[in-house]
Amino acid sequence: MTLYATGITTTTATDTQGRPLRRGDTLYYTGDASTSLYRLESGLLRAIRLTPQGRNLTVRHIVPGDIFGEEALHGIARSHQVVALTEAVIAPIYAQHLSGEDLWTVTRSLSQQLQRVMNDGVHIQDGELRERIARYLLNLSDSSLGGLHTDGRRFVRATHELIAEGTGATRESVSKLIGEMRDDGLLVPAYRCITLQNERELRALAGI
């Protein structure tokens, strides 16, 4: 999750005043009118869709430099909900003012994100849930949700619900397996924080 897009340089295309979001804020909902694209300046966002079973599913993470809200290019309603996972700053981009060079920047950013979504799809589709949890936590540890303890161990600020929505599982299944992974010495779960106790074994489990 370290890809960054080149910035839009056309001053009329981008709102120069970034808009702050607090953790948990929703930028827009499925079905909302799409009035602009956005560029994420800092923080971490996720795009959510509701499954036919009525569960939220994380379909994409949005990292700094990403341009998103591509429905605005087609004049259609928003196809998913976008929520801030951390404090964030976004900048609206107005499609009607984009130059040819700006459109290339948008295209490149969306292409990078498509590749990332295709790669990240493995979190949901490949392997048993235990493997998917390990893979997803390792991925998040490289994002704004990750951090380092003073002893060098990495941690992820994540709830069981977030992990469930990112791995296509139920919260109950995720909680059960995180408990088992704790007992096996792989993780140390705490309130909204999971320490990667044995990162080497987690990577072996995740196949990365």
Image: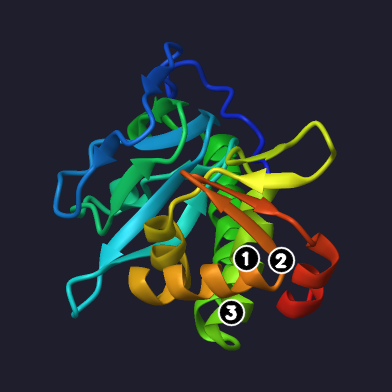
Q: Amino acid at mark 3?
A: Arg
Left of 96 or right of it: where is 1? Answer: right
Q: Secondary structure at mark 3?
A: helix
Residue lying at 15% horizontally and 46% vertically, measured from the top left? 32
Q: Residue furthest bottom?
A: 127
Badge number at residue 182: 1
Left of 34 or right of it: where is 205? Answer: right
Q: Secondary structure at mark 1?
A: helix
Q: Amino acid at mark 2?
A: Leu
State which quadrant residue 59 falls in.
bottom left
Badge number at residue 130: 3
Number of numbered discs: 3
Q: Amino acid at mark 1?
A: Arg
Q: Is residue 170 above or below residue 66?
A: below
Q: Is residue 32 above or below residue 150?
A: below
Residue 29 on image: x %, y %: 20, 47
* Residue under label 2: 186
